[in-house]
Image (cartoon, rainbow, N blue to C red):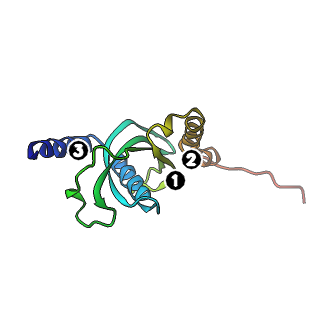
Amino acid sequence: MKLLLGIAVAVLALADAGQSPLQRRVVKDVLDYFHSRSNVQLLFREQSVEGAVERVDSSGTYVQLRLNLAQTACKKQTQRRQNCRIIESKRKPACLACYKFDNSDVPRVLDKYYNCGPSHHLVVKEIKHRDEAECRAVEEAGKASDALYLPGMFAFSKGLPA
């Protein structure tokens, strides 16, 4: 049993090591959101991250993750969260998260969207289309301001005759 626990901890450490700082920030934010819901009584942990996308453009960095969660035996108010064992036969919700960060030294969230539910819930056609549209809107955040002003651009206006 201890060997399995050691392997699980090592796998989680490797998964965390493969994530960028912004991706880890999104995972933390989504878990905080998920645990803030009144219908969630027990603690959930990140089980896996699938389909991670991170794109950088002039308006910022877009991050999209599909996060699979696993229910633990601990109450969500538990202080020592790292010792909570995963309950294998319980709920395994999935979350889709789309975030747009600006290009500052300490990236600020420009826009975000997340949807969490049963893993089969996110593959329903209508929900999938809505999620895709919401994520496209998040990815476009900050681009409208680029069209209005670019560094080095000068604005000229013609005054009305007096």
Callout 2 environment at 10 Å: few (<14), some (14 to 19), or many (20+)?
many
Q: Which residue is mark 3?
A: 12
Quarter holding the N terminus is top left
Residue at x-position 34% and y-position 62%: 76
What is the distance, in whole Å, between disc 3 and disc 1 at their CAs?
A: 29 Å
Instruction: Tell which tag, 3 or 1, sits nearer the viewer.
Output: 3
Q: Are discs 3 and 2 less than 8 Å apart at CB?
A: no
Instruction: Indicate left or right for 88 with 40 as reference.
Output: left
Inspect this view and state whether residue 159 appears.
yes
What is the distance, in whole Å, between disc 3 and disc 2 at their CAs?
A: 32 Å
User: x and y percent of residue 109 in the render?
Assistant: 47, 54
Callout 1 environment at 10 Å: few (<14), some (14 to 19), or many (20+)?
some
- SS for tag 3? helix
The one of 115 and 154 positioned closer to us in this rendering: 115
Question: Disc 1 residue type?
Answer: Leu
First-in-chain label (3 vs 2): 3
User: x and y percent of residue 99 in the render?
Assistant: 47, 47
- SS for tag 1? strand
Q: Quadrant of residue 31?
A: bottom left
First-in-chain label (2 vs 1): 1
Inspect this view and state whether residue 62 appears.
no
Callout 3 environment at 10 Å: few (<14), some (14 to 19), or many (20+)?
some
Residue 2 vs 105, above or below: the answer is above
Residue at x-position 15% and y-position 46%: 5
- Which disc is residue 110 wearing? 1
User: x and y percent of residue 112 in the render?
Assistant: 51, 50
Looking at the image, which residue sits at the far front?
89
- Which disc is residue 141 wearing? 2
Residue 103 vs 129, above or below: the answer is below
Residue at x-position 36% and y-position 54%: 28
User: x and y percent of residue 33 in the render?
Assistant: 44, 57
